[in-house]
Image (spheres, grey):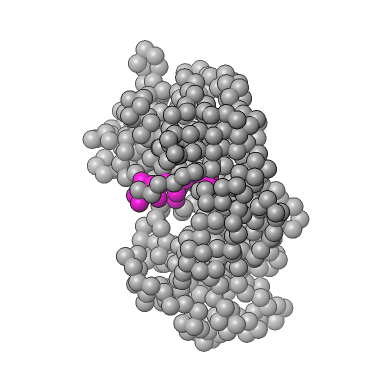
Amino acid sequence: MKDAISFILNSETISLRDFGPTDTLLDYLRISRRLTGTKEGCAEGDCGACTVLVGRLLDGSLRYESVNACIRFLGSLHGTHVVTVEHLAARDGTLHPVQQAMVDFHGSQCGFCTPGFIMSLYGLWLTSENPGRADIEKALQGNLCRCTGYEPIVKAAEKIAAARPSALFDPLQRDRTDIMARLWAVSENETITVVKGEDRTIIPVTLSDLTEIYAAEPKATIVAGSTDVGLWVTKQMRALNPVIFINNLGDLQTITVDEDGITLGAGVTYSQAFKTMAEHFPPLARLFDRLGGAQVRNMGTIGGNIANGSPIGDTPPALIALGATLTLRSSSGSRTVPLESYFIDYGKQDRLSGEFVEKLFIPFQKPESHYAVYKISKRRDEDISALCGAFNLALDADGAVEDIRIAFGGMAGTPKRAAHLEAALLGKAWRQETIDAARDALDEDFTPLTDWRATAEYRQLTAKNLLTRFFLETSGETQELSRFLLEEA
């Protein structure tokens, strides 16, 4: 059994064994390596000042993604290439084109957020040869600037997209083959366990290893993307021990499409799943685009969002409305449950000791079905929902409701279907009179709480209004209603 992780930091191969399971990449870079270009702003994955790139081998290629170093744990880095802002400039001091464009277009003022912006733009520069303004803004969703404003930064991004220098200038393009070979060389075929005092970091290399380890350590914390668990540590100061990292398990990162639907491994990130969702479930893909910034979507996993069981998690109501099912695995075998029944009560899920989420199945809908997801938040991008509603409707030949599934998050202690509302609509003609008569059935389904995101009255009224919006969008509207009507409410 190995007792150290190995990764590449800029150009140096690192072998690391003296660390705890909740030690962050940000602290390692700043304190241990004095790479202070990576900043700490929020320590919760919101501001982007700590953005770095992490390259990993995926499907036979080397994929670089922007991530938040403040909530990325060292134990998740085995077999990766970590790139900080210090690695971009040439050895003679010549700035990388991304850096030079920020200078030329005055994209920096106080400069604190600038390295994070540069790394996000660098990630876009690596993956897209001609990004449009929408692509640029999407890449920068997870970066906040307090003083410069975003227009000069966007103009800098447009400049580097229009005039690209030789790939030989860029260190990641120039050294890609060498980096891939070095990452293959540090790949392990046996479990890694790093011990520091009483703390243990465990990194299984196969799904079978994970099953056996979790059976023996049922109270361990399983970490995939750490976009939520990271905040347990940085904000709640929780001590986690032991921690099992699973982001390197290829068996949990598969996406399979067949005639019945889509199967996602529990370790598939939002970024990995986006293209498939956009092709088969466009409303779900649009929801993904509003989950955190690019850094969060690159780290966060759909399975983790479900396993965590948060009542304000955005993917569960959207997937419940589609009739998704969940496969849970343990040393005793696997079992499949409807996603809606997985959530039992606040903080309680139908998961037995030693059992973990293995995969998710999303069935294809009838071609004539109508499906929509609405996220309501104070800020359109990178914000937690006040509530999230999902609707899935099938009408019969006479225009009556043949089947309907409605689910909400943020309205109860768990993501939950609106059973009384569904019953009030089932079999009725899909028209305004039916909607008006059924709206108040929601009062029997939910008694929401008041918190700093929204009052109970706001949540209840908005949920009813989303039903009306869904009706309008399925009854003659030529396109979805403008987001400014409700999404910005």
The quadrant the C terminus occupies is: bottom left
Q: Answer above or below: position of 328 versus 134.
A: below
- Residue at (46%, 45%) from the top-left corner? 241
Q: Is residue 363 above or below residue 257?
A: below
User: Does residue 415 show up magenta in the picture?
Assistant: no
Residues in magenta, as a range = 222-236
Identify the residue at image location x=54%, y=41%. 245
* Image coords of residue 381 (percent x, y): 41, 53
- Quadrant containing the N terminus is top right
Q: Is residue 132 visible?
A: no
**Residue 142 is drawn in which quadrant?**
top left
Q: Nearer the viewer, residue 241 or 285?
A: 241
Q: Residue at x 64, y 79 (%)?
A: 401
Front residue (pair 383, 188): 188
Q: Where does the image place residue 121, in percent across and percent down from the top left?
A: 42, 35
| Residue ranking furthest to the right | 259
Instruction: Residue 379 in the image: state x and y as whole percent.
Output: 36, 57
State the residue lying farthest toward the top.
92
Residue found farthest to the front:
198
Q: Would residue 147 be found to the left or right of residue 225 on screen?
A: left
Q: How many marks?
A: 0
